Image (cartoon, grey):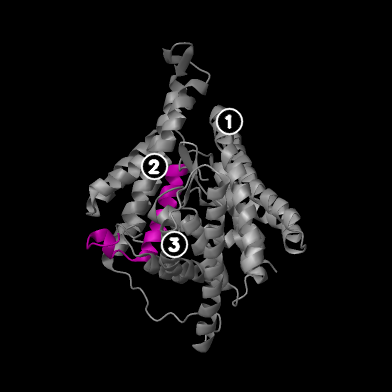
Amino acid sequence: MHISEGVLSPAVLAAGVILSAAGVAMGLKKMSADRMPEVAVLSSAFFIVSLIHIPVGPASVHLIMNGLVGVLLGWMAFPSILVALTLQALVFQYGGFTVLGVNTFTVAAPAVTAYYLFSCAIKRNDNSSLTALAAFCAGALGVGLAALLLVLALVTTGEVFINVAKLIAIAHLPVFIIEGAITAFCVLFLKKVKPELLN
Amino acid sequence: MHLEEFAGGNSFFHRLDPRVKFITFVPYVTAIAVMQGIKAPFVGLIISAVMILAAGIDIKKVLNRLIVINLPILILWIFLPFSYPGEGFFSIGPFTATSEGVLHALSITLKANSIVMATIAILGTSEIFSLAHALVHLRAPVKLVYLFFFFYRYISVIHNEYTCLKKTLTARSFRPATNMHTYRTYANLIGMLIVRSYERSQRIYKAMLCRGFKGTFPVMSHFSLKKSDIAFSATMALITVIIVII
């Protein structure tokens, strides 16, 4: 989920930087010294997870899991996703430095939204089907909202991108369901194996 | 996991002060990204290509990177030329490509390639840890730099964990396919990875406390500017101004 360099207009790029900076500042404020190692190593884990390819028919998709990042880290999802995208820009040149602001916001804002909407339902109930449903929604919303923000960034750059934006939205439909399913299974697993992670 | 593919070497770029790298890189790529038309990105492309050559890195690897970067841009080439209103440039069947559309697609391609090449030549030729160190000296929020430092430090460790978990799956003859069993298995694998990362992070924090961690790292070594660093900064400043003016 990232947009290449050179596509977006200066106004959209600047908006991305400002919004992300605010989110990251908020996340850093919440990150006390004793939680920094946890946020860091979980970020490493999600970086590795994003390299896993899941088969879908003849093709495969790679996971983003920003919904789960949000549920686990709350506002700290912003700095977590920023460092991951920075490394990606540095070593693979995917995304890139000038779009770092937009890309961070595109991935992290849905994470924080998932945190506010679903973390309560995931953490504070013992009914496993309700937990699974909330987790599915968190995972699906994470990718769905990220795709929507990406489309928004493209369309506000210029109406000429409308066809590309439509293609992006359609391409994300299978990812939407898979992310939801995997997030649901993953949360059920965590509840069984390490419930204190979700407290 | 070997991530620093271009950091080994002894060229002018490998020896540059990492602080200078950030100070020159950010305005340069920002200028390229925000300029309209194709003149500025074209100048950027030439300058970045020269930098790649001067950095003495494996050109084949750079070209491979560029191919990957240009794949999504190819999709833009399919849509953009035909989405612009304006004078017809050429037409395929019922679709007419306009010269404005072609120029816009070309501008994006030039921008993306010149920024990617600049990233490889300037930042890619330093080790990640020395770049993080430079960010501390440049007054970036230290919490964020520490986070990046630990995040990068533990990627290869977590990658080893992941390889182990995958081996256990293979040993149980797991074959990924499009079905719920596959998704559930991957979800459990990810869950296990998260559990192990969490437990490791708790041990790391305790180990840090044992060694007297109080929330900051003392910075032992300091960078020193050389004449070549100043010369490079001046040149890059001049180039950036030229890109903005034309």
Of tags 2 and 3, the one toward the viewer is 3
Q: Earlier in the sequence, mark 2 or mark 3?
A: 2
Q: Disc 1 residue type?
A: Lys
Picture residue at 55% right of the left edge, 31% below the top: A167
Q: Chain of mark 2?
A: B
Viewer-proximal residue among B169 and B122: B169
Residue extending furthest toward the front: B172
Q: Is residue A137 above or below residue A186?
A: above
Q: Is residue B162 above or below residue B28?
A: below
Picture residue at 60% right of the left edge, 77% below the top: A34
Residue A121, by quadrant, is: bottom right
Residue extending furthest toward the top: B93
Disc ID at residue B27: none
Q: Is mark 2 in CB contact (under 8 Å) with mark 3?
A: no
Q: Which residues are magenta?
A: B7-33
Viewer-proximal residue among B186 and A138: B186
Q: Is residue A131 visible?
A: yes
Query: x%, y% of residue B27?
Result: 44, 52
Q: Disc 3 residue type?
A: Thr
Disc ID at residue B69: 2
Query: x%, y% of residue B34?
Result: 48, 42
Looking at the rendered structure, the secondary structure element under dot 3 is helix
Query: x%, y% of residue A191?
Result: 66, 64
Q: Disc 2 residue type?
A: Ile
Residue underneath mark 3: B168
For the residues beneath circles 1 and 2, the answer to whether they share a chain is no
Q: Is residue A92 above or below residue B143?
A: above
Viewer-proximal residue among B242 and A135: A135
Query: x%, y% of residue A49?
Result: 50, 56
Left or right of A128 in this view: B81: left
